[in-house]
Image (cartoon, rainbow, N blue to C red):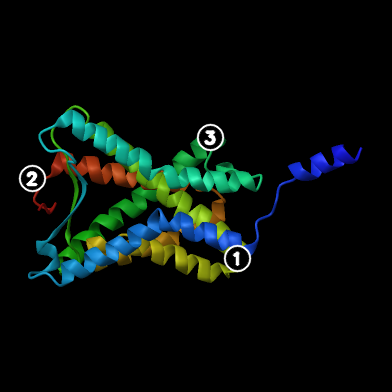
Amino acid sequence: MQGAVGSRAGDAVERPSRRVLRDETLLVLGVSLGASAVSAVISFVGSVTRPGGLKDQAATLNASAAPGRPWLDLAWQLFGIATALVPVALVAHFLLREGQSLRTLGLDRTRPWPDLGRGAVVAAVIGSTGIAFYLAARGLGFNLTVVPEALPDVWWKFPVLILSALQNSIVEEVIVVGYLLRRLGRLGWTPGAALAASSVLRGSYHLYQGIGGFVGNMVMGVVFVLLYRRWGRVGPLVVAHALLDIGAFVGYALLAGKVDWLPTA
């Protein structure tokens, strides 16, 4: 009887201490968006201390990893996308230890149509204002020229751009919204402080684009946190972010050099 009781007690979900939660959060950020934020700050310092204005410099997002060697390039592109998703798997592991899952954050297939519908509306609103803000920020000299893609014209170009957009959306919304807000709440942060931390972090890892990229993405971060708290799901945010990035990546590939209003490097 005692053995059975002991077995059930051993199978009970153990609640992590505050210190463990803090350390886990720092580790997740350290191997993902926190490290990206530090990298972006260093890149921004390099850009503002370089001769010439910001708009005369370029920030390239999806570049060739092996120019002139398309199959090797494809291998590197897929490797980069897959490894970038590892921190999301780490988040899932930490949640599983608590008896939870990514479904706790609202990343599942239980509500596909509401997630798609809400995400499409959010993408339409943010996409139109985001383009206008980027063009204005660049015109004022606050932003680098963003080159969303510089891949060779090969058969896998558009599939890789779409996969890259999906990877970005999953990593960012799961970690900087769902996971971070959950962890900060467990650590005793106020809702306002957690919102500020999430939105500033989002802006920070886009600072390599310039001040406009920082401000624009920080505002987007505030909107996404408020929507997440309203809906309780990162699903619509992942959809919105994916549509925004697909539009930027694929749209640039199709329009660059063909329309006057789109800046190119």
Residue behind mark 2? 257
Spot occupied by residue 87 in the image (x, y as percentages of width and height):
44, 47
- Residue that mark 1 sits on: 187
Question: Which mark sits nearer the N-terminus, 2 or 1?
Answer: 1
- What label does residue 91 carry, if any? none
Query: How many marks overall?
Result: 3
| Residue 109 disc label | 3
- Foreground of the two, 7 or 108: 7
**Which residue sits at x=75%, y=45%?**
12
Residue at image position (23%, 60%) is: 134
Single out the residue that lies furthest toward the right.
Answer: 1
In terms of sequence position, does the residue under pointer 3 or pointer 2 come before the other?
A: 3
C-alpha gap between disc 3 and disc 2: 39 Å
Q: Looking at the image, is 187 positioned above or below residue 81?
A: below
Q: Is residue 146 above or below residue 141?
A: above
Q: Is residue 120 visible?
A: no
Residue beneath the point at 46% across and 67% down: 197
- Tell whether 31 sits left or right of 42: right
Instruction: Point out the frontmost of discs 2 and 1.
Output: 1
Residue 55 place in picture, x, y as percent? 13, 64
Q: Is 15 on the left or on the right of 139, as rendered? A: right
Label 3: state its secondary structure. loop
**Residue 115 x/y as whole percent:** 49, 41
Quarter of the image where one finds residue 198: bottom left
